[in-house]
Structure formats: C-alpha cells, structure tokens
Amino acid sequence: MLKDQVLEHLWKARDAYISGAELAGRLGVSRTAVWKAMGQLRAQGYLIESVTNKGYRLSSRSNVLSGAGVERYLKATGLHIQVVDRVDSTNAAMKRMAAEGAPHGSVLIANEQSAGRGRMGRSFYSPPGTGIYMSLLLRPRTNAQRATLVTASAAVAVAEAIEQLAGEPVQIKWVNDVLFHGRKVCGILTEAAMDFESGLIDYVVLGIGVNTAVPADGFPEELQGIAGAAFGADPVPELRCRLAAEILDRFMGYYACLGSRACYEAYKSRSVVLGKDVQLLSPGREALSARVLDIDEDFALVVRTADGQVQRVNAGEISLRGAKT
C-alpha cells in the first residue's frame, strides 16, 4: 500500500525532512496521494511533523507497533512476523495457527488482548498501546523436560532486552517473572502439545507480555503495588518495535543452544530469590515455608524446608515472605 511505502521513506530519512514533491516523484504518485497517505499514517498513530517549505518528518516519539517496524530491527532469521491490533489471546490464537500447520518461527504480536492469559489460569491485563503481547511458535521435536528450558531462556532474553534499552538492571523471580525496580513488568506463559505416538513435543507456544508503559488510567486495583512498567514517560523511539525485535533476537540465540551455561549464569545472576525465605505455592496444597539454597542447571529450586529437609522444586510458584507477588 502507498502509506507503507511512504512510511518506509520517512523511516529511512529519520531526522531529516522530506518534501511531498520529492516523495511523490520517488513513488510515481501525485502530491495529493502523498498527503492522503500521511493522513492514514497519522490515523494509525504515527507522529508525523510537517513544516512549510521543508516537508514531512517522522517524529522520534512515534511508538506504533507494526510488523515492518519489528523487522527493521530484527537480526534473527527464519521468523515470520505478524502484527495485529487486537486479539483474544496471542497464545490462544497461535495454538489455533499451530493446529492449522503454521511453521516453526511464526510470531504473532498484538497491540491489545481482550482475554490475555497468565500462569495458573490467571488473566493478564493487556490494554492497548502500553505493552507488547506476543507468542512464538516452536517445533522442537524434543521431550517435555527439555522444553521446560524454553521458559527460563525467555526470561533471560526479556531481562537482557529491557536492560539494553532502559540502561538499568532487571531481576528475575523464579520461575519466569521479570522485575524492574521491584515491580513485575513481564509475564511468560509457555504451553506445549504432545505427539503421543512419538512421546515428543509436537509444538511449544511461548507467550510473552511486557508492560512498556503505565496505562493512562493506571493498573487495576488488584495489580496495584505489583505491576510496573519497564520504561518511563519518555521512552526510546519506536520502543515497542525495538523491544520486540531485541527479545526475539536474544531468545533465538539462547534457543539455538538450549540449556547453555551462558543462559544459566545469566538467569542465576539476576535471581531475586537466592538466599531468601519464600512460600512454596502449589494448587490444592498448603503453602510451605522454605529457604532457597540454589538454582540448579535445569532451573529447579533447591530449598531447605522448615523441618530441615533439602528438596528440589521444579513446578509451582513462590512468594517472597513479606512481599507482594
């Protein structure tokens, strides 16, 4: 479409102005057609400055989420990016796509989710314009134990991506909560389907939701004091496109050597639970008090319970004592 061609030229020009006449000449259309394309881009949310006798310029404050925008920053190969404005849940949609034969490396990114899902059947607050909500389809042909490494790799990838763009340290609360200034800014939900004949994973859907900004009306009451945003009111240009690409690049690097020592060390160095007293939470069971002694190379917790027993915990959730989670 013409508006996409116009956007590409504006992006390439970056901080420089480009006149309507020059754009019209490059694209072989009228200046009126260029003007209409500018209106369409502005309606999509792009901030386009216009100055008489100078032309048009794409503002560095533009933060529209688009497939072309993500691909501009993406270095990883073999990924198939699709960006939509609204979906019920990117994980639910991706599972439908997987059942229809979508290939390994399919990525669905949404500006908003109407029924976003988190772990333990919880909902995931996904308002428009203030986050990235994406799902990645993997077809690893491996066993379920190996697939559990995907979640930890994703947590490290998100933490590193935020650190790269925000310039501040990020922590991880076992198993997959990413914390910035002590607040949860990312949720990760990994779901898998088995091939019962082979006993191997048929596919894995990796869902990642990141709060890039605080919604205009704030977070819902139940998330007050828990949820936060990874960036302030004046984020880097094209933040959401750059962040999505940065996460995908870093994750695919770790996925290529799943279970690597580098990923393990990066995860452990960011852990907010090592040496801490926690509550072990499992559905249908009473909370169990314990102290975290270590995280092993399968990303399981090694804990000492109140009665002195040392246990390995590889499922469930934890709550830091005296802290909201």
Image: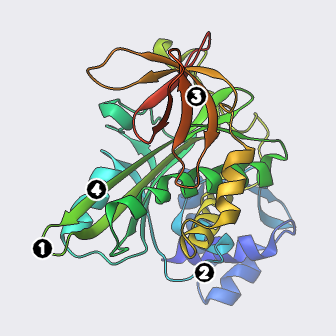
Q: Nearer the viewer, mark 1 or mark 2?
A: 1
Between the C-alphas of marks 4 and 1, the distance is: 25 Å
Q: Nearer the viewer, mark 4 or mark 1?
A: 1
Looking at the image, residue 310 lies above or below residue 202: above
Q: Going from the N terminus, do you reach mark 2 or mark 3 first?
A: 2
Question: Which amino acid, mark 4?
Answer: Ala
Question: In the image shown, does 231 or 179 lie closer to the viewer?
Answer: 179
Residue 286: image location, x then y, percent: 34, 14
Q: Quadrant of the C terminus?
A: top right
Question: In the image shown, does 9 or 322 lie closer to the viewer?
Answer: 322
Between the C-alphas of marks 3 and 4, the distance is: 24 Å
Between the C-alphas of marks 1 and 2, the distance is: 60 Å
The answer to whether residue 236 of the structure is visible from this angle is no
- Total labels: the figure holds 4
- The residue indicated by pointer 3 is 215
Question: Which amino acid, mark 3?
Answer: Pro
Residue at 65%, 60% in the rendered image? 263
Q: For numbered disc 4, what is the local secondary structure? A: helix
Please give the label number shown on residue 93: 4
Question: Which amino acid, mark 2?
Answer: Ser
- The residue indicated by pointer 1 is 197
